[in-house]
Amino acid sequence: MLSGLYERFAGQPGGSRLLAGARLRRRVIVVLHQALEMSHLSQSDLAKKLGIRRSAVNQVFRGDGNVRMETLAEYLHELGFEALLTLTRAGEPRRAALEDRPAAPMTSPANASLAFDLALTGQFLFESRSATRAFGSVAMTAK
Amino acid sequence: LTVPTSDCPHCGRRALQQGSALTVEAARNTAGEEPALAFLNKLMSARRAKRRRLAADALILLEEWSQLGKLEVPRQQRHIREDLWEIKTYALRFPYYETTDKTHRYTRLTHGFEKDIGKTVDGKMPANRINYGLWMIREDRAC
């Protein structure tokens, strides 16, 4: 793959951090849609289960604005799933895309404290300070 | 901004993203303008982080599309009219059309624009945007 706009943007101040955030936001949206599809529920069904307006659910599924971790967990739980975070080195997802292979996760025990740090922030997933050093992908697990 | 976008060796068009499934290019008109590239460049160099975040979202979307040949959230991609299709994030829309050669699939973004505020992601694309996209297809094919 040739370098292009992505590399140009990543080279700007703060560019790679914005791309890491965008990638994580994207994974969250994809996971939500996958969970909805696998649950065979509609957004209206989910809104009823959560006791909120359909438009609020739709806003989350569109990726409009920041999704709180608690909100993500609640939505996935009502759909019958939970989310897991996996860490990988900053820049690894792009390298993997360029080489047409899956991104390699970090699995050594030395990374456990970083994963814990990321989980403890309690802030938006993609605005965590830890996410500037390494950023994770989101996977689902069924209840 | 030292890394140039990649040019197609055959037609000279800019490859915005090149993946194993397809190459995303910017369509150009007979005056040599590339509205999609200009739109992305403007977002990427915006002073406000919020707008640069939109650019990051678009670049991640284009990467996914070029790798998979489709979007993982199917409703973010749809047919508009004739050869015109669109992909979209929650805030941006990119009309495009497809072309292939013997070995590869190319998609050419005719232009890009921000979604009207207050409209849903499933809302209709404004007629002037559709007409412009169709005009750009004719122009690009004439190049």
Image: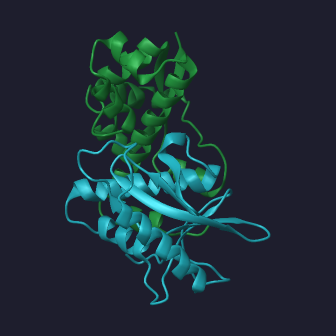
Chain colours: A green, B cyan
Residue that appears at 66% across and 82% down: B9
Compare residues B100 and A18 and report the one nearer the observer.
B100
- A16 vs A52, left or right, is right
Placement of the C terminus of chain B among the 4 image quadrants:
bottom right
- Spot occupied by residue A105 in the image (x, y as percentages of width and height): 56, 36
Q: Residue at x 54, y 41 (%)?
A: B74
Which residue is the extreme one toward the bottom?
B31
Please provide percent x and percent y for residue A44: 39, 20
> In which quadrant of the rendered image does the N terminus of chain B lie?
bottom left
Q: Position of residue B18 (x, y in %)?
A: 60, 64
Near-viewer residue (A110 or A48): A48
Image height of B16 relative to A51, above or below: below
For the image, the number of numbered tags is 0
* Residue depicted at 38% across the width and 24% down the height: A116
A39 or B48, which lies in front? A39
Q: Can see residue A65?
A: yes
